[in-house]
Image: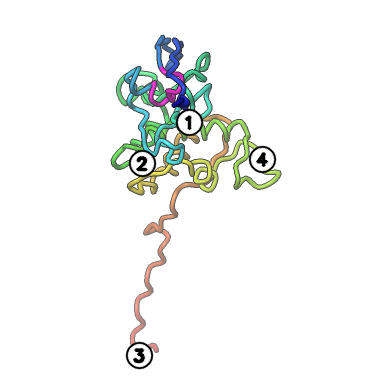
Amino acid sequence: MTTTQTRSPSVTSAIRLTVNDSEHEITLDNRTSLLDALRDHLGLTGSKKGCDHGQCGACTVLLDGRRVNACLVLAVAAQGRRITTIEGLAEGDGPEGLHPVQRAFVERDAFQCGYCTPGQICSAVGVIEEARAGWPSAVTPPGATPGHLDENEVRERMSGNLCRCGAYANIVPAVLDAAATATPGLETGSHETPVTTPSTIEPEKPAEPEENR
């Protein structure tokens, strides 16, 4: 009886990856995703494995400055490209060294359990750069001025990042804060909820005496 071999044997390759400005030489199965290469071979566990199908965005990293789902990219295809993970965004130690988007997320309390936060932050860095470069989104009106980012734009552009705990409330303000403070030339829309202050409330008029009514 003759049988047919239906599965191809594993083929490995020695590749060089540039991650967070550091060179890494690793040998791995050609079918290894960039996410697994980062986490299992390089020990960079900041990028999270959520759905592993490119639907939740927890594994988002930057490839040559553009955001991608690392679970959908083969590591061998990332050779010769600049890979930035959440570990590579900060420019120094301590709170002062945080990337503006990281700092805005802290100041706005834009996370809860934190599992999706690395992907959210990497995606937000890409979103701000896309807006600054004038790339339109699905909600950008035809003929709109390039370089504008408002609440609707942030929500649409960040829609590929899903959160299991629903911690969305402060993410949009955090992204707009970072865009406004660290991206010259990028116009940002309002992100503050109007607040009624005591000075805007008209004082009650004293009741007139009955004899004057």
* Residue 61: percent from left, percent from top: 45, 28
Badges 2 and 3: C-beta atoms under 8 Å apart? no
* Residue 58: percent from left, percent from top: 39, 36
Give whichever of 173, 155 is nearer the camera.
Answer: 155
Q: Which mark is residue 72?
A: 1
The residue that label 2 is drawn on is 110
Give whichever of 193, 138 is nearer the camera.
Answer: 138
Q: Secondary structure at mark 3?
A: helix
* Circle 1 crowding by C-alpha within 10 Å: few under 14, some 14–19, many from 20: some
The residue that label 3 is drawn on is 211
Numbered range of the magenta stretch: 29-37
* Residue 4: percent from left, percent from top: 47, 26
The residue that label 4 is drawn on is 145
Q: Is residue 85 above or below residue 205?
A: above
Q: Quadrant of the N terminus?
A: top left
Specify which label sits upstream in the sequence, 4 or 2: 2
Mark 4 vs mark 1: in front: 1
Specify which label sits upstream in the sequence, 4 or 1: 1
Q: Residue at x 40, y 26 (%)?
A: 35
Q: Residue at x 39, y 19 (%)?
A: 91
